[in-house]
Structures are given as C-alpha cells and as structure tokens.
Image: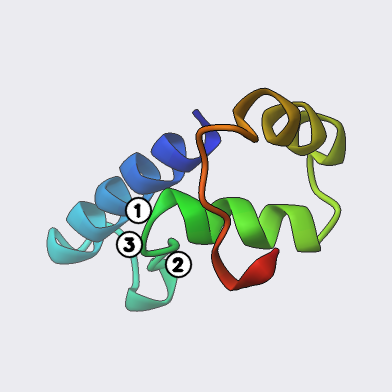
C-alpha cells in the first residue's frame, strides 16, 4: 500500500508542477517497481517487522533478486 501511495503522490506532484502550482523541486522520487521499493525499505530498517512477516509468508512463492 505504501508503494502505491508513493506512486499516486508522485503523479499528483507532477500534475501540480505542470500546472505551476508546485515548483520543479517538488518532484517526488519513486522506485521503478515494488521489488526495488521493498528491498530499500528492508535495507533502511523501515517497516522491518512487516518486511519480516512478508518474507515469511511469501518465501515459497517469491524470487528474491540480488540474493537479498
């Protein structure tokens, strides 16, 4: 959900920039996909409890990239 919210916030910021409501510095960075978002969330310690549960529940069905 957090990743989807970041995509929508980025789109909204971009629309505001195009309309002249926000300055170009308001542009929001987003990750290219959920896997990248999740990987950096784990590395940064953000939502570590949720990340651990997610790993446990999806271990059998998921391919973790970069041996992480």
User: What is the C-alpha distance between the residues marked 2 and 1?
Assistant: 7 Å
Answer whether labels 2 and 1 touch (C-beta < 8 Å). yes
Report crowding for label 2: few under 14, some 14 to 19, many 20 or more residues within 10 A (C-alpha): few
How far apart marks 1 and 3 lie (CA) works out to: 12 Å
Image disc number at residue 29: 2
Residue that carries the numbered disc 3 in the rendered image: 22
CA distance for labels 2 and 3 = 15 Å
Number of callouts in the render? 3
| Residue drawn 54% across the image and 55% down it | 37
- The reply to whether callout 1 and callout 3 are in contact (CB within 8 Å) is no
Where disc 1 sits, the SS reads: helix
Q: Is residue 41 above or below residue 31?
A: above
Res. 10 mark: 1
Callout 2: SS: loop
> Is 30 located above or below residue 62 in the figure?
below
Residue 48 falls in image quadrant: top right
At numbered mark 3, what does the secondary structure look like: helix, strand or loop?
Answer: loop
Give coordinates of residue 53: x percent, y percent: 77, 26
Q: Nearer the viewer, residue 18 or 35?
A: 35
Q: Check disc 3: other Cα within 10 Å, few if <14, some if 14-19, many if 20+.
A: some
Q: Is residue 13 left or right of residue 20?
A: right
User: Left of 6 or right of it: where is 48?
Assistant: right
């Amino acid at each position: 959900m957090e990743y989807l919210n970041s995509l929508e916030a980025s789109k909204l910021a971009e629309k505001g920039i195009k309309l002249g409501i926000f300055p170009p510095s308001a542009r929001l960075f987003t990750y290219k996909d959920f896997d990248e978002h999740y990987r950096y969330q784990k590395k940064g310690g953000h939502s570590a409890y949720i990340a651990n549960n997610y790993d446990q529940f999806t271990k059998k069905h998921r391919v973790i990239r970069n041996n992480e």
